[in-house]
Image: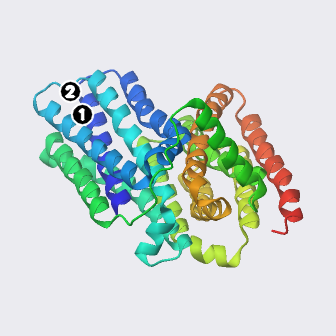
Amino acid sequence: MSDFLEFLAESLLQFTLIWYFLTNNRDPEWIALLNAAVYLPLAAGGLFSGLFVQRIGARRLLLVSKGAAASANLLIVLLFIDGMLSLTVLVVLALATYSCIALALTAHAGCIRAFARWAGVRLMTYNALRAGAIIVAPLLGVSSAGLLADRYGALVVLAIACGISFLSFLITLLSFPRSRTGAGMRLTLASWVDLTRRTLTAIRASDMSMSTFALCAGLFATEITFSGMIIPLEVQAHGMSATTLSEVGIAGSSLAAIGALLAPSAQSRVSFARLVAASGLVFCMTFLAVAAQRDCSRLSLLLAVATPGFVLGILSPVFMTNLQRSIPVTLVAHGVGLAGSLPMFLSPLLMVIAGATMAGHREETLVGMALAMLAATIAMWPQRVRRGS
């Protein structure tokens, strides 16, 4: 519930401010900078926030980071009221807010098993419910922000978002289960390198293997690139409207949320290795299907986004649960942080490649991505067979 409210508040805040600045004749380039201020802390935070968990403990870090994020949102509202919220200030506050959210997400992972025990559910079920909530919250925020802003004004929406953010902090404060304190690790580069080395060694020695870990990161990065770059290019190239792009995005996210809720059932029927391989093959076939279509229809785009979205919706909580079970408890926070940050670093690189090649070599680019995904899936499989998965 706390994470659902946090992401709902941030999506309300982000959408309302973007729309407000766009309608007040601001340069669209600032929107790209604002989005960078959102995703850069999430990517970098996943790499380094595990070290903060080791230093001060998951409970203390989660409470401090959520409280700081709510306070930053309150400051945004107050500056908006006074007419002092410039785009420069907003970008700085967005960096601060999402840095806190990155810390909170990793801190939550550090005591994920305590949360599952406190909720009285299995770890897999808890991860599935949490993944579904995190997917649904931005959908609800974006779909309701425009309606609320048109009827009541931007200030009312920002105030609602701020109140939801503080409610998320309050729920965390009252319901947080007891967990271990930090190990007092020093915040140095040498400590981070040592923590990363031990985490990767634990993954390599576990049933998961580094090849499966890397392929999952690649799958999630590919999904970000596919939905965020390739599909918008396809919509634009075939003369479709922004409404179509919105409908495609909502369909993909909705199917991903449904997939996440079905993950516990899927895990009991299909092995993790087969689920990863199936996800890779689904992406491979999706790329080939899009490449083969000269005239894309709305239905074909919906299917192209919804199918891998549904499969990865299942894979995400299953992957996280296997990762959390495969490595020592003290390394879970850093392992989950690495798993979350790698796709965010890989996806901009894939977007640059796709953006540079799609215009003149559309079919070749899509077929190349399909073959790369197929090769990665085939390379992973022998290791899984040798491990008996």
- Res 70 quadrant in image: top left
Quadrant hosting residue 205: bottom right
Percent x, y for residue 100? 38, 41
Judge by depth and name the residue closer to the eye, 28 or 8: 8
Q: Residue furthest left?
A: 82
How many residues crowd around disc 2 within 10 Å: few (fewer than 14), some, or many (20 or more)?
some
Nearer to the camera, 314 or 333: 333
Residue at 49% in and 63% down? 112
Judged from the image, the secondary structure of the residue bearing numbered disc 2 is: loop
Q: Which mark is residue 213?
A: none
Say what secondary structure mark 1 lies in: helix
Question: In the figure, 373 relative to 260: above or below?
Answer: above
Location of the C terminus (image quadrant): bottom right
Q: Is residue 100 above or below residue 284?
A: above
- Image spot of residue 19 (x, y percent): 28, 36
The residue that disc 1 covers is 20
The reply to whether callout 1 and callout 2 are in contact (CB within 8 Å) is no
Q: Residues within 10 Å of mark 1 (few under 14, many from 20)?
A: some
Foreground residue among 311 and 109: 109
**Mark 1: amino acid:** Tyr
